[in-house]
Every structure is written in structure tokens, then in C-alpha cells.
């Protein structure tokens, strides 16, 4: 369970060897795609890429091959480092597990630090769900990452640094545990998808882990809390901190956690991939738990400035709800190969005489008593079990199927306002006689295009969509059908 491990010395040596040995095969400056899961080769490949002076693009095995092909077409890499089995034909060279291992153990020519990525260069590109039906790549520079780490280490305390990693490396939440661990000289305990889906194994791993810092979405902690008898400080006696990000942390979840882990500190942090993991923080102590519902998402880190603006870009006062704009030293240079989208969402602002990049988050929020609060989205992006999804991404992929004319995906909410699942309303070319069979058929085809967590749970076949007065599909009316 905790059998495979990698020392600091080996990580450094193997990644340097790999960087040097790959050097001669890297014709252009294009980023390197690193495909895999929680394998030990993953951090070796990430570091090898940046030591060779190239950005890396992490892609998890949960990504369907057709989506990976979209990423390859967009990135045009010279090489792919596949730490897990990958059956795909493409123009670039694919290094499999054995060849990566061979290249990282072979004595190389020395790779000098001059080759390493410079602060203004792109360090990684993370592809997230895109409304067009194709994933969009968020570029993060080395200086964005450096500035994020400088702040985030202050959330880690000063005792033991054993990080529990839940998120796959293709999600930016994993940057929090992986790079804080690398920076602090700690230990990263990466939990793979098999263990994550089996509570018994998970509890066993917790017992062995001696973890001190927990990094996850609130959804994952809620999942663990369903086993309240075992998910306690007795199982994880060294756990000192919970660092949450990525979705709403409910007051109830915070209280339940505090009951099970009385000594642990719970931090709520907020931020999109576009501003490097997180940019606000707040310690959810007992006073906050007692007096605030919903919980605040806190105050901006040093180097970050947050504004609440209306649709005309006018700055709003305390208590007024508007779009959250993030400006500062961790805001991304933009989307990979997509100037149009970059210009739509990113800009520059002069703050205290200094120029910063700014990002229109699409999140709704407001300030109250110095703290920021999150209250949903202004568009069709959602979070389901911690995963960022554009509903149009699913709809556009459903529309690729021959039998479908149009599809609209609607979230189903729990009583506490969190999304429980997704339902698809579908208009088919031919009348559906057998709902179950058609549903199964659509589901299995859809798996070829989008990851499992994006597949709607329920399908409703309809003849026509309800429309609003101005001729748009009436999503509210469909939402009501689910009540
Ligand atoms: P991602 O790019 O996957 O990290 O998702 C970013 C989005 O997750 C943000 O734009 C928010 O909509 C949501 N989010 C992140 N952190 C929080 C939080 N602490 N509370 C509520 N929503 C959050």
C-alpha cells in the first residue's frame, strides 16, 4: 500500500538524467505531455520537463483518448512521457514506462541549471473543461507558481510535512500538495483511484500514512465522513491541518470534521486554476463555525487584489454581489493557443503603480466585514464532487452523437445547495422506444469523449425544449422538472 517510494536524492537524480537524456529528442520548445496517474514516474517526468526548459502538461488516465487527442493536436508536443500504458497513434514520439525508466537511470551528460525554466516561462499547462466541448489549457508560469508557494507554505505550520494527495496530477489542486511538499522537503502520499474508491483500503492507508496535512476538495472529506467511526483522529493521529479548495466548504462539514479531529486546523481557500490553485484563505475556527453560515472564503493573499464588479465593470461596495475579479502575481498569462478566450477573460490592471494581470473569474461573490464570500457562478460552469465542468462541454459532446439533435444538461441540487448529480434532457432524431437501452447506448458512446465524472446520471427524452420569451432554451423550466 505504501510500498513504492522515492527519496529526495533519487527524484533529483532521475529527473536530471531524464531531462539530459531527452534533450537530444526535443526538437522544438513545445511542452511535454506527461500521461499517467499516481505513479512515481509522474513527479520525475514533471521535473525532467522543467529541467529541460519545457513546460509539462499533466494528463490523467481518466481522460478519454479522444480528449487526449484534442490536447495533443492543441499542444503539438515533440514527445509524450507515458508513465502508464497508452495505446494511441500520433506524430510525436511516445516514451512508455520502461523507456522512461531506462532514460532516467542511464548516466547522462550533465544538465546545467541554465537549461531550467526561467521565471517568466510557462511551467505547466492544465487542461480544464471548455464550453466548446474541447478542453482549454491554462498556462501557469514559474513565477506564478513561486508566488503561490511563497504564500501557501504559511498554511502548513512548522512541524511535520506529510501531505495526503487526493487530486489527480492533472487537476491544479494537486499543485498545492505536490509543490508544497517539494518546497518544504516533506513527504507526498499519493492516493490512487483504486484506493480512493474503496473505503476500507482508504482507512487502512490513512492508518499507515502518518499524514499531517490533508489537501482535498470538501467533497472528498464529506465522502470520508460517511465512515465517521473510522475517520477520526485515532486513525490519523498526526493530522494537524485540513487545506480545502475547489468548492464550497459547508458549515456542517466543517463542524463534523472538527468533532472528529478536535486538534486539527481547518482552512478554507479559494481560487481558480487561472490564478494558480488558490488566492484567499481563512482559518475556520470554532468562532467562525458558530457564527457564519455560509462560511467565508477569506482574505486575499499578499500580492493578490480582489474586486467585486457589476456587468459594466463598476466596483461594488461591501455586501453587494457581483463578479469576482482576481488581480495579482499568480494570475495566469492566459489560455494555451487561444488569444480570443484569453482576451475575453484576462486583462491588466495598475494597482499601487504596479502592473498586474487580472482574471474575470465568472464567480459571483461579495465582501462583508473584510471577508470574501462565494455565491455561485454567472455562467454554466459547475463543480460536481470537486470536478470543474462546463455544462456546454457535455452538451456539445452529446450533440456529436448521430442519434441526438440537441441536449441540455441540468444540475440536480441537494437541500444544502450543493450539486448532487447531472441530468440530460435530450431530443433524439428518432422516437425512443426503449429509454433504458438508448440511455445505455448514449452513455457508452459518451465515454469515448468525456471523463466518467462528466457523464449525466439521468437522461430524459423530450420532443421539444421549453423556450424563454427571448428565444433561448429555458433552463429554469427544465430545472423545475427535476424538483
Ligand atoms: P478549478 O479551476 O478546478 O480550481 O475551479 C475553480 C472554481 O472552483 C472557482 O472558480 C469557483 O467556482 C470554485 N471554487 C474554488 N474554491 C472554492 C471555495 N473555497 N468555495 C467555493 N467555490 C470554490
Image (cartoon, rainbow, N blue to C red):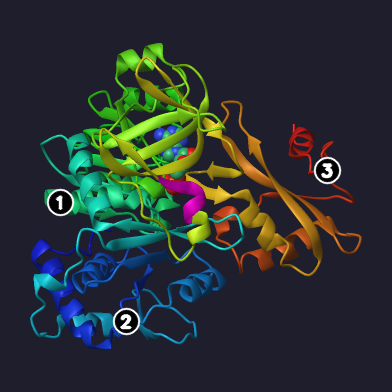
Residues in magenta, as a range: 342-347
User: Which residue is found at the position 50% from the left and 43% from the top?
Assistant: 385
Q: Earlier in the sequence, mark 1 or mark 3?
A: 1
Does the segment drawn in magenta span residue 345?
Answer: yes
- Element at label 2: loop
Q: Nearer the viewer, residue 238 or 413?
A: 413
Q: Which label sits on residue 183?
A: 1
User: Which residue is found at the position 47% from the left and 21% from the top?
Assistant: 294
* Camera sees residue 172: yes
- Element at label 3: loop
Label 1 neighbour load within 10 Å: few <14, some 14-19, many 20+: few
Does the segment drawn in magenta span residue 372?
Answer: no
**Residue 259: where, in percent of width, then height?**
33, 22
- Mark 1 or 3, closer to the camera: 3
User: Which residue is found at the position 52% from the left and 58% from the top?
Assistant: 340
Q: Nearer the viewer, residue 295 or 300?
A: 300
User: Disc 2 and disc 1: Cα gap in Å?
Assistant: 29 Å
Q: Earlier in the sequence, mark 3 or mark 2?
A: 2
**Residue 465: where, in percent of width, then height?**
84, 46
Question: Up-down: is 439 above or below 158?
Answer: below
Q: Are marks 3 and 2 in contact (CB under 8 Å)?
A: no
Q: Which residue matches tag 3?
A: 471
Amino acid at each position: 500500500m505504501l510500498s513504492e517510494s522515492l527519496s529526495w536524492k533519487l527524484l533529483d537524480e532521475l529527473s536530471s538524467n531524464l531531462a539530459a537524456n531527452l534533450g537530444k529528442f526535443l526538437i522544438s520548445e513545445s511542452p511535454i505531455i506527461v500521461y499517467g496517474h499516481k505513479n512515481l514516474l509522474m513527479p520525475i517526468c514533471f521535473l525532467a520537463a522543467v529541467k529541460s526548459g519545457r513546460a509539462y502538461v499533466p494528463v490523467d488516465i481518466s481522460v478519454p483518448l479522444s480528449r487526449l487527442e484534442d490536447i495533443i493536436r492543441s499542444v503539438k508536443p515533440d514527445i509524450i512521457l507515458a508513465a502508464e500504458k497508452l495505446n494511441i497513434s500520433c506524430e510525436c514520439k511516445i516514451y512508455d514506462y520502461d523507456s522512461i525508466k531506462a532514460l532516467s537511470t542511464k548516466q547522462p551528460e550533465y544538465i546545467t541549471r541554465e537549461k531550467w525554466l526561467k521565471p517568466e516561462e510557462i511551467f505547466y499547462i492544465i487542461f480544464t473543461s471548455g464550453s466548446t466541448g474541447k478542453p482549454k489549457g491554462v498556462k501557469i508560469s514559474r513565477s506564478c507558481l513561486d508566488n503561490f508557494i511563497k504564500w501557501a507554505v504559511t498554511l502548513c505550520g512548522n512541524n511535520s510535512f506529510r501531505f495526503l494527495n487526493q487530486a489527480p496530477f492533472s487537476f491544479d489542486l494537486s499543485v498545492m500538495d505536490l509543490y508544497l511538499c517539494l518546497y518544504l522537503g516533506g513527504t507526498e502520499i499519493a492516493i490512487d483511484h483504486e484506493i480512493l474508491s474503496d473505503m476500507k483500503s482508504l482507512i487502512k492507508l490513512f492508518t499507515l500514512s502518518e499524514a499531517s496535512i490533508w489537501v482535498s476538495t470538501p467533497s472528498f472529506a464529506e465522502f470520508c465522513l460517511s465512515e465517521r467511526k473510522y475517520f477520526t483522529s485515532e486513525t490519523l493521529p498526526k493530522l494537524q491541518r485540513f487545506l480545502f479548495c475547489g468548492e464550497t466548504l459547508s458549515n456542517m462539514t466543517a463542524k463534523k470534521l472538527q468533532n472528529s479531529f478536535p486538534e486539527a486546523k481547518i482552512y478554507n481557500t479559494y481560487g481558480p486554476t487561472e490564478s494558480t490553485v488558490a488566492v484567499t484563505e481563512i482559518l475556520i475556527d470554532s468562532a467562525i463555525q458558530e457564527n457564519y453560515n455560509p462560511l467565508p472564503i477569506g482574505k486575499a493573499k499578499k500580492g493578490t487584489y480582489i474586486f467585486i464588479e457589476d456587468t459594466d465593470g463598476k466596483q461594488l461596495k461591501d455586501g453587494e454581489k457581483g463578479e469576482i475579479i482576481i488581480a495579482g502575481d499568480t494570475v495566469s498569462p492566459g489560455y494555451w493557443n487561444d488569444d480570443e478566450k484569453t482576451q475575453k477573460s484576462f486583462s491588466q490592471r495598475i494597482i499601487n503603480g504596479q502592473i498586474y494581470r487580472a482574471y474575470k473569474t465568472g464567480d459571483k461573490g461579495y465582501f462583508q466585514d473584510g471577508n470574501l464570500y462565494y455565491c455561485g457562478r454567472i455562467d454554466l460552469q459547475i463543480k460536481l464532487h470537486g470536478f470543474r465542468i462546463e455544462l456546454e462541454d457535455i452538451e456539445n459532446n452529446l450533440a456529436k452523437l448521430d442519434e441526438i439533435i440537441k441536449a441540455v444538461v441540468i444540475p440536480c441540487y441537494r437541500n444544502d445547495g450543493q450539486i448532487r448529480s447531472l441530468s440530460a434532457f435530450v431530443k433524439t432524431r428518432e422516437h425512443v422506444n426503449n429509454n433504458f437501452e438508448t440511455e445505455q447506448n448514449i452513455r457508452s458512446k459518451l465515454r469515448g469523449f468525456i471523463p466518467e465524472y462528466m457523464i449525466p446520471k439521468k437522461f430524459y427524452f423530450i420532443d421539444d425544449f421549453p423556450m424563454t420569451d427571448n428565444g433561448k432554451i429555458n433552463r429554469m423550466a427544465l430545472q423545475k422538472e427535476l424538483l
